[in-house]
Amino acid sequence: MATRQSKARPRILRSVLENGASTALAAVLLIAWQVAVPLLGISEFVLPTPWAIIARIWNDFALLMQHAYVTGLEVVFGFGIAVLVGVPTGLTIFYSRLFEKAVYPLLVALQTIPKVVLAPLLVLYLGYDWAPKIFLAFLISFFPIVISTVVGLQTLEKAMVDLLRSMGATEMQTFFKLRLPTALPSIFGGFKVAISLAVIGAVIGEYVAAQRGLGYLQLQASSQFDTTLSFAAVVVISAMGVLMFSAVSFVESKVVFQREEAK
Amino acid sequence: MSAAMEVVGVATAQRTGKMAKGVAVHIEGVTKVYETRQGDEILALERTDLTIEPSEFVAVVGPSGCGKSTLLGLIAGLIPATSGRILLDGAEVTRPHPQTGVVFQSDLLLQWRTVTENILLPIEIKRRHTADYLPRVEQLLEQVGLQGFDSKYPTELSGGMRQRVAICRALVQQPGLLLMDEPFGALDALTREQMIMDLQAMWLSAGNTVLFITHGIEEAIFLADRVIVMSPRPGRVDLSLKIDIERPRRWKDHIDPRFVDYVAQVRKIFEAKGVLTER
Ligand SMILES: Nc1ncnc2c1ncn2[C@@H]1O[C@H](COP(=O)(O)OP(=O)(O)OP(=O)(O)O)[C@@H](O)[C@H]1O
Ligand SMILES: [Mg+2]
């Protein structure tokens, strides 16, 4: 108990210092930006000040949220489908020798293709509405989920499986009591990579052809030399990425055993 | 030979009194050939015969690679025999027998489960009510000196404590046959000494059959009713040495003339086989 407390104090102090340091640095950079723009006579069409971007987000909040809602849904659906398809695909690769030999190398090879270059083709095949954006978000987040699932399942020691077998466990019991809990940290690592990529996928899809969404809004703004709105869209897209990532992290903290806690 | 075994059987039955519920093990001409990935064949165990009486404590010593873990895996029903057969209470082993508990060299505790949850794992697997076993868990933890640690996680325990939990897990369902593969190999000398004494006490009160695999000659002689000496490549039984030292044994029995003589007998075999050489 005593050791725990004496350890906790410097840790809190350190985290305050570290967070404080990064906040301070960010503040300094923002202020420098704010001051430099008028000082160097940079036009607001080229680079708006941070304050102008914040003011714009405030003024056009309803508009931004209307488009954020569309992009957000695309991300959630694309990622959701990637989870629903990716995890079972990973399981099948793990359990089926044939599937592993036939499909896994192909998936690994396909993963190296930059998925965003498929965006124009997807529009061609799937139209201008939700479908190509959701599909791109799905496609781009699918691979990390499959691979992290397979890798997570493969990390298990054979002796552990023997232990459960010696108790008379069925494969179903071994899966739920041992394999899945062992693989979960890796699987959630994949989810976190995937959710960030899904945001990129949805926005790129909107760049190519759309009537709604933050990517569309940003493109519109740029074509009208409304750089401030374009920056505002960037901020909202980033915020959305952070929010989605935090949501996955939150679920992870509820589902996955925290190694740190036990230390 | 069979007369001698009869005597052992009677002696163990007397000692354990009402709790003579150990499983009888018969190994008949068992051979195990492994196939490596390169397609080579490795003869790990050759035509091995071994009988273990109910409630007998048998220790197996032998150099690394002589097939001790293979023997244990075969009895546990984890590895299929290439030829020959293994009977537990007269029934041939084709898959893990519900009466066996296994302790491996490493503790193999599940990190995300508390001590109690780890110990209850075999009960969950057998779909019994875990609540019924909570008093049993308490009793086991007390026997190994871990009372109060029930809700700790494995990472909060030392290596010795973790191995104790692994032993409790193997014993929770009161198995008729306890298989232990170098359970104390990774422990420091002091912890190991304590665990040896605790194991003897637990076995004396439980009365199950034990197969205990070890590298330690002294450890084997101290604990066992009978020590089996194996030699390598191909693995086979070289000597079956009955240990006539009364129970419960005390640590000072290590300097008993009989004990010293048993050690010398085992060492002689290893020297003859070139496992031990004096330079
Ligand atoms: N799965 C396997 N595939 C191929 N060969 C194996 C396999 N398991 C064991 N062997 C071989 O069988 C022989 C006996 O192995 P085993 O693990 O039974 O030895 P051991 O007596 O337990 O050794 P140690 O004391 O080092 O644990 C060794 O030569 C080993 O290389
Ligand atoms: Mg071994």
Image: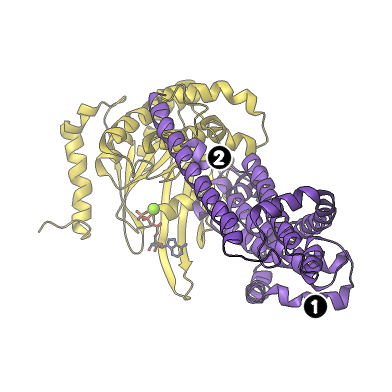
Residue at 33% across, 36% down: B224
Direction from residue A75 to residue A154 in the image, left or right: left
Q: Is residue A133 above or below residue A165?
A: below
Direction from residue A75 to residue B99 in the image, left or right: left
Callout 1 secondary element: helix
Mark 2 or 1: in front is: 1
Residue at 69% across, 55% down: A235
Question: Chain letter of disc 1?
Answer: A
- Number of marks in the rendered image: 2
From mark 2 to mark 1, how far is it between C-alphas? 46 Å
Tell me the amino acid under the disc marked 1.
Answer: Pro
Direction from residue A71 to residue B100 in the image, left or right: left
The outermost residue toward the left is: B279
Question: Chain letter of disc 2?
Answer: B
| Residue position for label 2 | B112
Q: Is residue B20 above or below residue B29?
A: above
Q: Quadrant of the N terminus of chain A?
A: top left
Image coordinates of residue B204 in percent, x first then y, are 40, 26
The reply to whether residue B91 is visible in this rendering is: no
**Chain with yellow colouring:** B
Tell me the amino acid under the disc marked 2.
Answer: Trp
| Residue position for label 1 | A120
Scheme of colours in the image? by chain
The reply to whether residue B220 is visible in this rendering is: yes
Splitting the image into 4 quarters, where does residue B278 fall? bottom left
Image coordinates of residue A118 in percent, x first then y, are 75, 77
**Chain with purple colouring:** A
Cβ of mark 2 under 8 Å from ligand 2: the answer is no
